[in-house]
Image: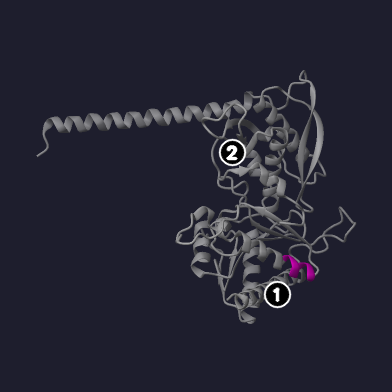
Amino acid sequence: MISRFQTILFCVLLAISIAMGAVLWHLRDRAHQRLVAGEDSAPTSAPEVAPAEQATLLVANDADNSMLAQVQSLPLPQDPGARARAILGRLLDLYAAPKATHPVPGGAASVGQVFLMPTQADSQSTGPEMAVVNLTSAFAASHPSGVETETLTLLSICGTLHANLPRVTQVRFLVDGRTRSTLAGHADLTRTYLAAEADNTEGQHP
Amino acid sequence: MVVLDAAHGGDDPGAKLSDGQPEKAFTLALSVRLRSLLGARGMQVITTRESDATIDLNRRAEIANHANAQACLSLHASETGTGIHLFVSSLSPAPPREGVRFLAWRTAQSAWVTRSVALAGVLNSVLLHAGLSVTLGRTALPAVDSMACPAVAIEVAPESAAAGAPGEPPAAPLNDPAYQARVAEALAAAMLEWRADAGRMEATQP
């Protein structure tokens, strides 16, 4: 026989659990909304007042599955995250241009944010970093499907980040702030990419 | 024993090829043709699908791992790039440890990467000998990364135009039956070569 006191206690605990679940769900939705709203407010290109600097872009080529370093001059903000975003924006602008060697629609607006964080909790400010690249779902939806093309996009992003921000040793990808299984049906987006992997990409040798 | 994994299928059409055919249909047709060629040459073949069925990526790796195969080929097709793209897992090679009976599911391929690179080398050599253009690379494909066998992802793209003629239409589109037959014959020849190599290695081992 369950006592009246235990029944009331159970009901109260159940009500509290449901209320906490609802609050957590609400907070999660709000956090996601904030992340998505940030894409609209964040600048899609570096402010023109910033001085032009040289950036190295690893530009993919579908014809021979290779990547070629290309130095470009562009205005770059001082904040490392915004800087990374501006550089990747230029890279994706090249891919969206007519007669691109690695055609991918979308351009600079395809990079929502780039977050930089230390790879170890106790690491110094000069230690290795992980870059979390938040891509837009429109970019993923319009990306050509294929092992080669998807791999080249991811590796050229990793290589470009590492070339300009040498402390970036690992890269993870999100799409609209969420994890996604593959970019366009092939390349794994759930794993952590090592920036050094991009250095090994050659046309003819594995 | 060879495992042929016709990528995609059912709800997952894969890439859309230029003639409107989905990638899943191309890979299934190639798998069926290759199975016949290998069967005629006395090789045992297991396929991950024989019809337009949805097969989970984990299930594909399960089939390959239960087969204890000499080679696992994941078949893909794309309109991007030219020729045959051969991809080996980008996982770091990990030598098999004595006494370890279980492998981490998502990185099972790491113990086989060295053999997979060797398999890609044999495929590259035979495909080139057959007059096909080949590019080699490393990638992260969830199904291949979970396979505990020498595994290569093969992506068939349109045959390249004549050398020195950039921008020219491909010498053979994906839907060219003669091109498909050449690719399948070359892959079958490569598997025979791989089996012979494996036999020679076993014979030389004490």
Query: Where is mark 1, residue-wise?
Result: B189
| Percent of width and height locating residue A182 | 59, 48
Against A188, residue B206 (above or below) is below
The amino acid marked with disc number 1 is Ala
The amino acid marked with disc number 2 is Val
Characterize the local packing of mark 2: few (<14), some (14-19) or many (20 or more) Cα atoms within 10 angstroms.
many
**Way the structure is coloured:** one colour
Magenta segment: B124-129
- Which secondary structure, mark 2? strand
Question: Gap between marks 2 and 1, in whole Å?
Answer: 42 Å
- Which secondary structure, mark 1? helix
Q: Are marks 2 and 1 on the same chain?
A: no
Any part of residue B74 in sight: no
**Which residue is located at x 67 percent, y 23 percent?**
A79
Q: In the drawing, what numbered circle is on residue B122? A: none
| Percent of width and height locating residue B43 | 60, 78
Q: How many circles with numbers are drawn on the protein?
A: 2
Evaluate if marks 2 and 1 touch, with contact meaning CB atoms under 8 Å apart.
no
Observer-side mark, 2 or 1, equals 1
Query: Where is mark 2, residue-wise?
Result: A175
Location of the C terminus of chain A by quadrant is: bottom right
| Percent of width and height locating residue B111 | 56, 59
**Chain letter of the residue carrying label 2:** A
State yes or no: residue B17 in magenta. no
**Which residue is located at x 67 percent, y 54 percent?**
B138
**Which residue is located at x 54 percent, y 26 percent?**
A34
Magenta: main secondary structure: helix
State yes or no: residue B127 in magenta. yes
**Chain letter of the residue carrying label 1:** B
Any part of residue A33 in sight: yes
